[in-house]
Image: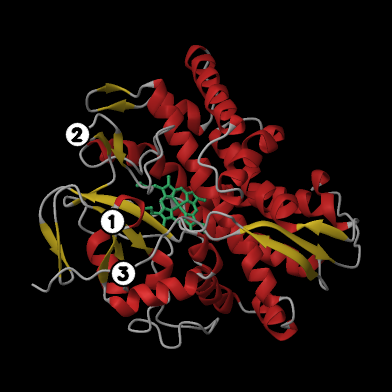
Amino acid sequence: MQQVRTIDIDINGEDYVRRPLDMEAAAREAGPVAWTESNGGHWMVSRHAAVIEGLRDADTYSTEKFLDENGQLAGGIMIPTVPFYRYLPNESDPPAWNGFRKSIAGHLSPGSVERLQPVIDQYTAEVIDEMIELGEADFVMQVGSPVTAKVTLHLLGLPTEDWKFYAKPIHLLFADGASAGPGVAAIQERLSSTITERRAAPQRGMIDDLIATELDYGPMSDEDVKDLVFDVMVGGFDTVAGLMAGSLQWLQDKPDLKTRLLEDDEFLQTATEEFLRYISPAVGLSRTATTDYPIADQQMHKGDRMYFMYRSANWDPAEFDEPETMRLDRRPNRHVAFGAGIHRCVGSNLARSIFQTVLRQFLTRVTDYEVVDFEQYKMTNNNAGFARMIMRYTPGTRIDSSAR
Ligand code: HEM
């Protein structure tokens, strides 16, 4: 066993916001796993093989929150720990995780997403109708976020016209780097009151199925339903929007590739995986070691916090030839943009489907867009994406999507 390898990186610091890719390269250079004293001290797991090794070992590396020796809430998937809400199933370990995951997984399976395709087509067409005549729009909040939010709300069985009420505060969580705010508190309250109402008078949405779920130890609690619904929203809204925005920005001056994406479905599939790898909307999340156990060549100790770096793994030259080059036909492409192990993204089928639908419709209808201004998130160690991305384009015509 080697001695502790250290590195001086603050994942919540200014430098990480300004030069994240350089920092991640430095972390990989230092070794697969290195210790930083910042943010109370934690490990940085940066290389592809080590990230997969650790994420697959859910017995040793826990996502649960717990009270530390000072009675403070600790653990969870963020560094520092966010005390306001619990992401479910993300912040649960087996055996509890099994029931939580199962309760949402069926709604997001390949078959369920396929059945949802007409709804995805419809909302995409409607949302593009709303912006196409304008000639200038913020892609993030006028296309990416509304399509994803409306489809997700439809699936949950919540009113789609309320999309802004949910999507704006969740967008600000990432864009402004605040871990909570009045908007998020309002969402939590609204979800709680909706769950009470729907328990009394069920309708036919995913939220009603969650309320009716029986777990091993009894019925799902209202609090658990709220946390599951909130995780689905936070997990999906901005990650998909960020993936779309980053892909379209990269494609804007590549007409031949845009045409090929529309004509060649196999190319669209490999391109989707490469956009996921290169952009990595989920940058990194954390775990806590439950026991003394090594990862790569470093010894973890019980209670150690660990930051698993998905984007860094996706840019690891030991796994990907020329990782800094976008190759839309890259194969194989063992990216970890959706994570790995038991917590691997349960929304990946839906994410791919919404992404490809929007890409197809947007490239078909908005043929000459140009990104004239953009601003990246202020908080960058969990998610990569855009506070806004202003596009200018020749105004087009509506297709009256509501009548389709
Ligand atoms: C491009 C879009 C997306 C990316 C990059 C992404 C990324 C990820 C990653 C990396 C994880 C693993 C977290 C961990 O290791 O702790 C995850 C988990 C999760 N994602 Fe996604 N996600 C996306 C879209 C979605 C969508 C659309 C939904 C919901 C419909 C969703 C819901 C979730 C949930 C609920 C989990 C927790 C799963 C569990 O703990 O078992 N995600 N996602």
Crowding near pointer 2: few (<14 within 10 Å), some, many (20+)?
few
Give the label, 1 or 3, closer to the camera. Answer: 3
Query: What residue is at 42 percent from the left and 35 percent from the top?
Result: 228
| Residue corresponding to mark 3 | 7
Q: Which residue is mark 2?
A: 69
Task: Establish whether ligand 1 lies closer than 8 Å to the Cβ of label 1.
Answer: no
Mark earlier in primary sequence (2, 3):
3
Q: Give the secondary structure at mark 1.
A: strand
Quarter holding residue 384: bottom right
Check disc 2 and give the amino acid type: Glu
Mark 1 or 3, nearer chain start: 3
Give the percent coordinates (x, y) of residue 47: 31, 73
Between 285 and 20, which is closer to the camera in this rendering?
A: 20
The location of residue 2, given as percent across then percent down, is 11, 74
Evaluate if marks 2 and 1 touch, with contact meaning CB atoms under 8 Å apart: no
Upstream in the sequence, badge 2 or badge 1?
1
Task: Find the distance from the CA under tag 2 to the CA under tag 3.
Answer: 27 Å
Crowding at mark 1 (Cα within 10 Å: few <14, some 14-19, many 20+): many
- Name the mark on residue 126: none
Task: State the SS at label 2.
Answer: loop
Q: Amino acid at mark 3?
A: Ile
Quarter of the view holding residue 10:
bottom left
Q: Residues within 10 Å of mark 3 (few under 14, many from 20)?
A: some
**Residue 238 vertical placement versus 368 (above, below):** above
Residue at image mark 1:
42
